[in-house]
Image: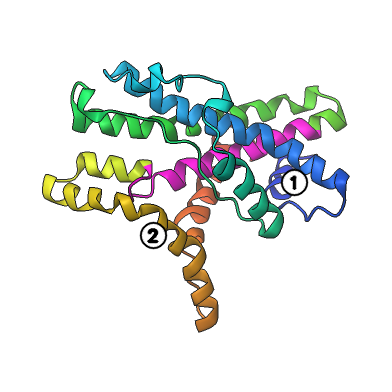
Amino acid sequence: MRCRELLLQSWTGHEPVNINDILFLASIWILPVLLAITLHEAAHGWAAWRLGDDTAKRMGRVTFNPIAHVDPLGTIVLPAILIFAGGILFGWAKPVPVNFSRLGRPRRDMVLVAAAGPGINIGLAIVSALALHLLPFLGPSFGEWIGRNLVNSININLLLAIFNMIPLPPLDGGRVAVGILPRPLAYQLARLERYGLFILIGLIFILPLLGRQLGTDLNIFRWLVLAPLEFLRGLLLHGVGLI
């Protein structure tokens, strides 16, 4: 199967109609999602450790063990329900503890720690795209299964990188913005952190519902995340010579 077909089918998917469909869908998503989340969170902890704060290191969060980073509700239950119910992927992992006051240069280092997670996701997407060149050397059935995993890895890693760089605390992009904005603006933005999750839920779920009632498109998630994802994915695949 060609890379373009794998991209289309793995991203759009299909509604599971029996146990075999459900198991197959799980088999092509579980590994990419766990790797993306695990390395994202471990990267935050590693960056903080190298920059002077060993809180995450002491708590066992600088590890490739996904169990240390998985939140049962946010990483497993909610995403599974949303994917099977409507094809939406939304969730969270356990936040990596960082004591910013222990960093060598707190404002600068906060930016580096926050950017480490999305950065590793971009790296994983690049590695997955390069690995698609190996598919012709694999058998048809196994090659297609590996290809779907790799394509899903590209999608989920780009999705995590773009979504997390939205400049709203407690997302990584919010912490980056707090670190680089002038102090008065940074202080005002940082105060939104306690409401950040509720703002995101409102933007992603409630606003589109309101838009449908009003007969207008208010799908902020598609504008802010899915459109950039499509652009970056095309750029990446072109860059590695796949399209």
Q: Is residue 80 left or right of residue 124?
A: right
Where is residue 82 drawn, in percent x and y?
64, 55
Work out whether residue 230 can be spotted: yes
Answer with left or right where residue 108 lies relative to residue 210. Answer: left
Horizontally, is 178 left or right of 80 in the view?
left
- Whole-percent x, y for residue 227 in the image: 51, 56
Tag 2: residue type?
A: Ile
Residue drawn at the location 51% of the way across and 27% of the way down: 39
In which quadrant is the C terminus drawn? top right
Residue at image location 68% in from the left, 36% down from the top: 30
Give the answer, above or below, for where 9 lies relative to 40.
below
Q: Which mark is residue 133?
A: none
Disc marking residue 5: 1
Q: Secondary structure at mark 2?
A: helix
Disc 2 crowd rating (10 Å Cα; few below 14, some 14-19, many 20+) is some
Q: Is residue 169 magenta?
A: yes
Which of the 4 quarters of the picture holds residue 143? top right
Q: Earlier in the sequence, mark 1 or mark 2?
A: 1
Q: Out of 116 and 227, give the one closest to the viewer.
A: 116
Q: What range is drawn magenta here?
A: 144-171
Looking at the rendering, in which quadrant would you find the N terminus?
top right
Q: Nearer the viewer, mark 1 or mark 2?
A: 2
Q: Is residue 225 above or below residue 178?
A: below
